[in-house]
Amino acid sequence: MPATAYGQCTSAALGTFATLLVADPRALEPARDLLATELAAIDAACSRFRPDSDLHRACAAGGQPVPVSPLFTEALSVAVAAARLTGGDVDPTCGQALVNLGYDRDFGSAREETTALSRPPVPGGGWRDIVLDSVRGDVTVPDGVLLDLGATAKALAADRATAAIAAATGCGVLVNLGGDISVAGQPPDGGWLVGIADAASFDTTTATVESRQLVTIRDGGLATSSVLGRAWRRGGAQLHHIVDPRTGEPARSCWRTVTVAAATCVAANVASTAAIVRGERAVGWLERLRLPARLVRHDGSVVLTAGWPAQDNDASRG
Amino acid sequence: MRDSYEDSPAQARDASFRRLGRLTWRTTQLGALATVGFAIVFARSAPAQTGSAQSPATVTPGSPAAPSAPVTARVGGTPKPSAARPSGSQPATAQPAAPAAYPSASTVQPTVTSPTLAPPTTPPAPAPSSATPAPTTSSASHGGG
């Protein structure tokens, strides 16, 4: 495949990185502005660490209705729909569980703390009692429930950004927010070239990550969930950010990394996160949904589903 | 000249009763026709309105496509009408004159944006062997979901 003259830029955003690719380099400047606007909006609406965010206000209202922005309503709607679609495996009400696990501030700071945990795990499940008023534009979060939309809000931002950029510029676009990739518009010849990685030592600030596989995508989204990247230690225990809502503890999964391709980045993210929580059952579930996926066990062996392309160094295929 | 029914008070009364009866019958017929007409118009318009409200993927809060009947949705359970809301908070777009045209509580999707776990139109393909290094990577990053 010949080198493609993408317009490209990468910056820090949402506690991770944001990479923007546009098929026409002339569209990079307006695309970058649109992406920045979308990221600022999603952060203002959904940040768990900003006292002025819609999420923070909704969780602090003691179970009373709170007027929120349309974007937060959309993000929360997506999150609870994800919970419903996965039988509660992807649960937006695991915020308190993450706090009790030590993820109570920006990840870069939280992982510096290594003392033993002092609070018990908190199961999720509160999403069933969230109330959305579509007319008044307010939401009611049950008292004591702390939301965390991290599993879906970032993917939603990627989908929204690519849709807006493609509509405004008329050219193909790819947005990668910390591994959650959304594409829209006319892709370059041959599609978008994307590396798939699952190395434990991967640092998002390093541009030289080693890809385990190269694939091309033309539409929809691609997301990777892993117990490796956002992980930390407390009191000698290794923890990670994908919580099993039934226990409030980090999911004990047979997979270390799951990558899924879907019609949207949100769908890909929801499926990859749920697959980590579901463990072995995820293979049949993904096959039934016809979602192409690449699942990596802790020993490095790989299981592929629904037409995910094989690669020579993949150990096994589902 | 005098009308014949005026010849006898009893005959005049009977004639008046017959005319009143005919008038009542025609009024009843008109009412029935009007009812059938309303039913036809309603049957044509109600499914379209209900259908649009049942398309959660396209309904966004506050958008023109959103159901105009006030609805509160308990996202994990059964949606319910927001009857307890103060009447002053009713939106100007509410149309109580045709309540059956709006979705019942059991048909309202609780979310305004409902993603589906659908596959991509084109699945990922293997990169050509001559591919250059990927310009971006989906990975187990610190920001990965």
Image (cartoon, coloured by chain):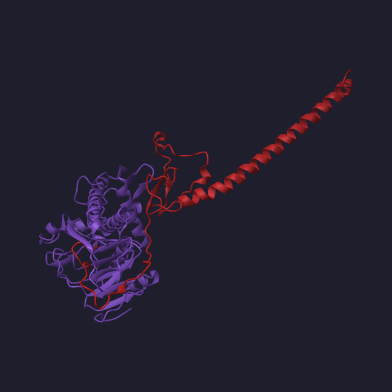
Chain colours: A purple, B red
Q: B12 above or below A38?
A: above
Quarter placement of the N terminus of chain B: top right
Q: Is residue A141 something that shows in the picture?
A: no
Q: Position of residue B97 (x, y in %)?
A: 52, 38
Q: Toward which corner of the image does residue A198 lie, by quadrant?
A: bottom left
User: Looking at the image, how many numbered discs can be counted on the residues?
Assistant: 0
Place of residue B68 in the rendered image (x, y in percent of width and height, measured from the top left)? 44, 43
Horizontally, is B90 left or right of B18 in the view?
left
- Is B112 on the left-hand or right-hand side of A248? right
In the depicted view, which residue is nearer to us: A174 or A17? A174
Query: Which residue is at the front of the view, A301 or A268?
Result: A268
Which quadrant of the figure contains the C terminus of chain B?
A: bottom left
Residue A70, how many percent across, how many down? 32, 46
Image point 13% across, 58% down: which residue? Answer: A108
Q: Quadrant of residue A195?
A: bottom left
Question: Does residue A247 sit above or below A287 in this rendering?
Answer: above
**Relative to A78, is A276 above or below?**
below
Position of residue A288 measured from the top left corner of the image (x, y, whole percent) = 40, 71
